[in-house]
């Protein structure tokens, strides 16, 4: 059955609100606008990244503040692409890139991570909030800023890391951060399919 004009308009407005929410959260994070970032998250949000796995939007924002003070400021591009809505619940999946500049054994390097950001969102008192934030890894690359310099990487150690985020894992290892080897990634399609099935169940009303 074809949707009436009012329903189509509301669907469009909700989708734009959700896309704006996803873009605003990453922009605020990168620009250290932690007040704006905090307002994007639900108080009970669950967040998992390469360096953080925890519960509570405020806790994640505060951890991000400390993390950025210690490691510098990586940047994010995010392109919200696919939103699904069911009443006051929604999911959003967005192609994204993470840009990270670091120094390895005196050599300045750039790490680019190709991924997707996935979030649940809930609407409270008319406002959408992020209920989760998950990174779905695709692949990553590392290169020296000065192309005449050799990349100072232990290739044998790198070969043991997940192909979907091996250079990111390597950089975090150098920083002393242990990265979960079982994060979601395109190199494990069965796990990714199970994750999406669970998100569809949640969207349909499951409490899982």
Image (cartoon, rainbow, N blue to C red):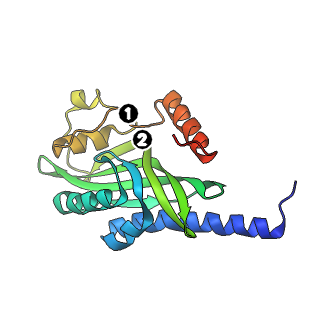
182 shown above or below 115: above
SS for callout 1? loop
Q: Are marks 1 and 2 in contact (CB under 8 Å)?
A: yes
Residue located at (52% from left, 27% from top):
190
Residue extending furthest toward the right:
1
The answer to whether 44 appears left or right of 181 in the picture is: right
Residue located at (30% from left, 31% from top):
161
In the rendered image, is residue 201 in sight?
Answer: yes
From the top left corner, tell me how far across and down residue 37 is, in percent: 38, 67
From the top left corner, tell me how far across and down residue 89 is, in percent: 59, 55
The answer to whether 141 appears left or right of 117 in the picture is: left
Q: Earlier in the sequence, mark 1 or mark 2?
A: 2
In the rendered image, is residue 33 in sight?
Answer: no
Q: Residues within 10 Å of mark 1 (few under 14, many from 20)?
A: some
Disc 1 to disc 2, C-alpha distance:
7 Å
Q: Residues within 10 Å of mark 2 (few under 14, many from 20)?
A: some
Label disc, if present, on residue 17 of the rendered structure: none
From the top left corner, tell me how far across and down residue 135 is, in percent: 42, 46
Q: Quadrant of residue 32?
A: bottom left
Q: Nearer the viewer, residue 91 or 175?
A: 91
Instruction: Name the residue carrying label 2.
Output: 139
Instruction: Name the residue carrying label 1.
Output: 163
Q: Nearer the viewer, residue 123 or 162?
A: 123
Residue located at (12% from left, 46% from top):
105
From the top left corner, tell me how far across and down residue 75 is, in percent: 34, 61
Residue located at (38% from left, 50% from top):
47
1 shown above or below 197: below
Tally the marks: 2
SS for callout 2? strand
Q: Quadrant of residue 206?
A: top right
């Amino acid at each position: 059955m074809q949707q009436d004009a009012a329903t189509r308009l509301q669907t469009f407005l909700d989708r734009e609100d959700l896309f704006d929410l996803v873009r605003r959260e990453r922009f605020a994070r990168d620009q250290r606008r932690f007040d704006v970032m905090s307002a994007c998250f639900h108080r009970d949000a669950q967040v998992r990244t390469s360096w953080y796995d925890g519960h509570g939007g405020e806790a994640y924002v505060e951890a991000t503040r400390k993390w950025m003070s210690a490691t510098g400021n990586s940047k994010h591009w995010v392109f919200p692409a696919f939103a699904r809505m069911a009443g006051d619940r929604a999911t959003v999946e967005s192609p994204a890139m993470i840009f990270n500049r670091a120094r390895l054994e005196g050599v300045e390097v750039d790490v680019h991570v190709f991924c997707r950001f996935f979030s649940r969102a809930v609407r409270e008192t008319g406002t959408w909030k992020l209920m989760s934030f998950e990174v779905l890894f695709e692949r990553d690359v590392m290169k020296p800023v000065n192309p005449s310099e050799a990349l100072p990487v232990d290739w044998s150690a790198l070969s043991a890391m997940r192909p979907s985020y091996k250079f990111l894992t390597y950089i975090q290892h150098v920083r002393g951060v242990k990265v979960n080897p079982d994060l979601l990634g395109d190199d494990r399609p069965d796990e990714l399919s199970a994750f999406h099935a669970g998100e569809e169940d949640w969207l349909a009303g499951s409490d899982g």
